[in-house]
Image (cartoon, rainbow, N blue to C red):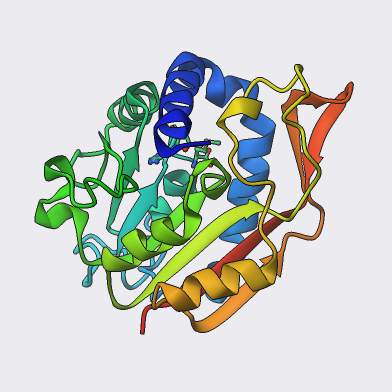
Amino acid sequence: MSDHTAVESNRSHWDENASTYNSKFEKTILQIIAEVQARLDWIGVDWIEDSSGNETSESSSKGPTKEVRLLDYACGTGLVSRALAPHVTQCVGIDLSEGMVDEYNKTVENQGIPHSEMFAQVGNLLDESDPSPAALSGPEFYNFDIAVVGLGFHHFDKPSFAAKQLAARLKPGGVLLIIDFLPHGDHKHNHDHPAAHTVTHLGFSEEAVKTMFEEAGVGGRFEYDVVGKGIVFHGVKEEGNTMSRSVFMARGFKL
Ligand SMILES: C[S@@+](CC[C@H](N)C(=O)[O-])C[C@H]1O[C@@H](n2cnc3c(N)ncnc32)[C@H](O)[C@@H]1O
């Protein structure tokens, strides 16, 4: 699949499915959020204390004393931002699909969260012919403490280029975190699977992800953790059954 085809397939598929994504995948989204939140220490960022309501020394009325900034790349409706928002000072989402970005920003607005603390922007950092797009060149799109891609890497044509592009947006010592599928069978010919034509990779082994991180300069203290129970995709059927996938989280520090 060429760059152009993957990008266009993804854009149109996710635009069409943006408004139903949260309701269709509600249980799956909550399951992944819980798995991310269970790994805060393992991810290894120097988080701010939970600012979602529990008063702590750092989340007192004075607000957090340090900045912790999250890049949620291929953010969709904002799963990763939802999981990590209580522990960072700013969430910046980027996604190819305007529909997904609209859903992300609608939720932020409905929750009364200031734009300066959480927003998403339409964009693509993965076009090798335009690797530094003007829309993503402002200082708000650089120097992140952590960049995360939740279930996006298997939609990218060149995951290794994606890792390099995201690494470039991190501070030295920043963390790249990828959440994606372990290697699995081919579902491209399964007509019940609506997103099949947007998928470019059938999962990633630990070895493949480690090489990708090392080549991108984010191989420091690399770890690949398999989510024990696997993740059930309640809204998707595969061979007549509800789709279930083994999921990993991989993280490394920018050297
Ligand atoms: C399965 S959804 C995951 C969304 C969200 N991260 C989550 O975990 O719910 C995949 C997302 O990747 C986005 N995407 C695909 N290719 C992209 C690219 N080259 N740049 C930015 N986003 C991309 C799609 O638009 C879609 O929103």
**Quadrant in the rendering for residue 148:** bottom left
Q: Is residue 20 left or right of residue 247?
A: left
Q: Is residue 251 left or right of residue 180?
A: left
Camera-side residue: 200 or 54?
A: 200
Q: Residue at x 21, y 46 (%)?
A: 130
Q: Residue furthest right?
A: 240
Q: Residue furthest front?
A: 2
Q: Residue at x 22, y 72 (%)?
A: 66
Q: Is residue 187 above or below residue 191?
A: below
**Percent position of residue 52, x then y:** 41, 51
Q: Residue at x 54, y 16 (%)?
A: 20
Q: Residue at x 59, y 67 (%)?
A: 209
Q: Is residue 21 above or below residue 119?
A: above
Q: Is residue 228 left or right of residue 207?
A: right
**Percent position of residue 72, x then y:** 38, 49
Q: Is residue 98 above or below residue 141?
A: above
**Percent position of residue 252, x then y:** 49, 75
Q: Is residue 78 above or below residue 252?
A: above
**Quadrant in the rendering for residue 196:** top right
Q: Look at the image and tell me whether residue 43 can be seen.
A: no
**Quadrant in the rendering for residue 194:** top right
**Percent position of residue 253, x then y:** 43, 78
Q: Look at the image and tell me whether residue 144 can be seen.
A: yes
